[in-house]
Image (spheres, rainbow, N blue to C red):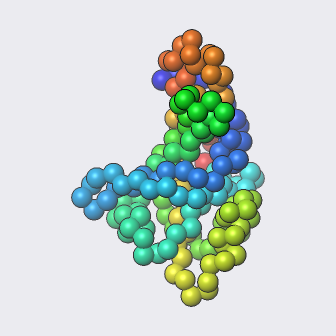
Amino acid sequence: MTEYRVGFEVVEREVRKKSFGVLSVVDSKLRPHSTGILYGVSPPQSKFAFYIMVGSRYAKVRHIKRNPNVSLVVTFPHYYIRFAPASYAMFRGVADFVPIEDKDVQWAFRQSRILRMNIDSTPIEYDVAVIRIQPEPTVFCCGLGIGLLELRRSHETGSYKVKIPGHRL
């Protein structure tokens, strides 16, 4: 895996266009546990973070309380060329919990129609947890920002790493 010409700004732009990812946590028996989630991204002027709203009784909440180390994979499928493998960006990080009233949480959830619907339709009495993922500096990517013809010529160039700028961590 190499450093590549695609910078963090490209990865961030593409991740902001999506709202679905796969969150992996460590369960009580130290096994990986992965689940699909909807996420929002912090405002561009804030520290880079992901926000996930879930019921506070979900297993992922219990797992994160025991072990806050997580990973989040965001995939970028090819909609017209279905047989081509999806590109992805994988973020490792540490998860914690923030109040739903947090201004960055509110901003992040207002940027996507589905997230806006979730936050607006959640009953007051529903016990909600908001997970914040603060990623490590290195993002692992495959295929993102690289054309299919280039990937076909040299599959090894498809896997690369980018660094989140220090002022965004």
Picture quadrant where residue 4 is located: top right
Across and down, in percent, residue 54 comes to 52, 69
Q: Nearer the viewer, residue 68 or 32?
A: 32
Across and down, in percent, residue 142 comes to 54, 30
**Which residue is at 56% across, 62% downward?**
52
Note whether 1 is above or below 121 in the view shown. above
Task: Report the number of discs.
Answer: 0
**Which residue is at 65% across, 45% downward?**
15
**Which residue is at 58% across, 33% downward?**
82
Given the current orientation, which residue lies at the most extreme left position?
A: 29
Q: Position of 1 compared to 162: left or right?
A: left
Note whether 149 is above or below 66 in the view shown. above
Note whether 103 is above or below 69 in the view shown. below
The answer to whether one can see residue 167 in this image is no
The answer to whether one can see residue 10 in this image is yes
Across and down, in percent, residue 166 comes to 63, 42
Picture quadrant where residue 39 is located: bottom right
Across and down, in percent, residue 80 comes to 66, 33
Given the current orientation, which residue lies at the most extreme top position?
A: 153
Q: Nearer the viewer, residue 88 or 4?
A: 88
**Which residue is at 73% across, 62% downward?**
113
Q: Position of 158 compared to 67: left or right?
A: right
